[in-house]
Amino acid sequence: MNASSQADRAPDFVVIDVETACSRTSSICQVGIVGFRDGQEVFAWETLLDPCDEFHAGNTRIHGIAAHHVVGQPIFADVHATIDAHLTGRITVAHSLFDKGAIAAACRLHDRTPIETRWLDSVRVAREAWPDLENHKLGNLARFLSVPHRHHDALSDARAAGWVIVRAIEHTGTSLAEWMAPPRPVGPAPRAAADGPYLGERIAILGQPRDGPIAHAIAALGGTIHSSVGLTTTMLVVARAEPFGRSVLANAGYRRALKAIADGRRLRIVSAQALGLA
C-alpha cells in the first residue's frame, strides 16, 4: 500500500484506555486502543501486560485482572512501538486524562520515548454535549447512548469513549477539529435590567451556560441569573423543548428543583421555548 492510500485510510482519531495493577499509574496491566473514521470503528487492538509491579486487591476487584493472568505477557517496553504507531501524530481520546498520565509514567519507567499525540478528553466533550446529565462517568454515558459496554475492560472502555465522541459530534454539530480547540471559558452572568417581567426572579438555567443567549435574554427582562439551583432560586429555565428527555430528568439541578417544589418552595420549572426564549 502506498503512502497516499495509507493516509486515506488513517483514522480520524484513536481512543486508548488502560487498566493498572496498583496505585502507581505506571503499573499498566491492560491496554485497549480503538480507531474511528467517519463515525465508524475501523480497528481495535488490546493486550494484557505484565506491569512489572504488584497487584493490589482493590484494583483486581475493579477490573478482574490478577498477577496470574499476566504471566508470560509482554511488558510495556515490548509494546511501546505498537502504541506509538497507533497514537503518534494523531488525535488520541481518553475518558479523563488518567490514561495520558499512565502512558507517560510507563514510558519513563521503561525508558521509552514519550508518545507525541494530541489528547482529547471525552469527559469534557460529554459535559459540553450533554450538560444536563447527572454525571459523565463512562458507564452512565454508555447507558444513556445505548452503547454496549463492559466497564473496566480496556478495549470496551476505549470503544465506548470513542462512541461518546461520535455521538457528541452528531448531537451538537461540533466537528472534531472544533472539539480540539481550547474550551471557551464561561464568563460572568449578565446584569439584570432595572425593569421587566422577570424583575425579582432568581433564575437558574439548565442546558446553557450562565453567559449564554438565554441568560442574556432573561437578564434584559429583569431576571437575575444564578449559576445553579439554590435556596433562593425562583425559576429553573430548561434549554430544551418539552417533554423533557432522560438527560434533563436525571439532572441533579432539575431534581433539586423538583424537591424544592415538593417542599412547598415558590419555584417553577419551565422550558425556554415556553417562555419564547428559544
Image (cartoon, rainbow, N blue to C red):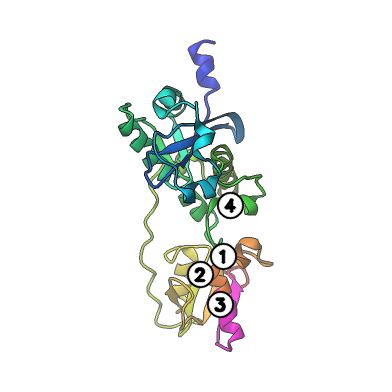
Q: Are marks 3 and 4 in contact (CB under 8 Å)?
A: no
Mark 2 vs mark 4, CA separation in Å = 26 Å
Residue type at mark 1: give it.
Ala
Residue type at mark 3: give it.
Ala
**x, y percent for residue 262:** 61, 84
Say which quarter of the image contains residue 110.
Answer: top left
Q: Looking at this view, name the residue that lies furthest to the top.
A: 2
Q: Circle 1 sits in a helix, a strand or a loop, which is it?
A: loop
Q: Looking at this view, name the residue that lies furthest to the bottom.
A: 264
| Location of the C terminus (image quadrant) | bottom right
* Mark found first going from the N terminus, 1 or 4: 4
Q: Are marks 2 and 1 in contact (CB under 8 Å)?
A: yes
**Residue in view at x 63 percent, y 54 percent:** 144
Residue receiving disc 4: 139
Mark 3 vs mark 4, CA separation in Å = 26 Å
**x, y percent for residue 260:** 56, 82
Q: Which residues are magenta?
A: 256-271
- Mark nearest the camera among 2 and 3 is 3
Residue receiving disc 2: 205
Please say if 112 is above or below 22. Answer: above
The numbered dot on residue 257 is 3
Say which quarter of the image contains residue 165.
Answer: top right
- Mark nearest the camera among 1 and 4 is 4
Q: How many marks?
A: 4
Q: For this rendering, which residue is in front, 194 or 261?
A: 261
Residue type at mark 4: give it.
Gly
Residue receiving disc 1: 239
- Mark nearest the camera among 2 and 4 is 4
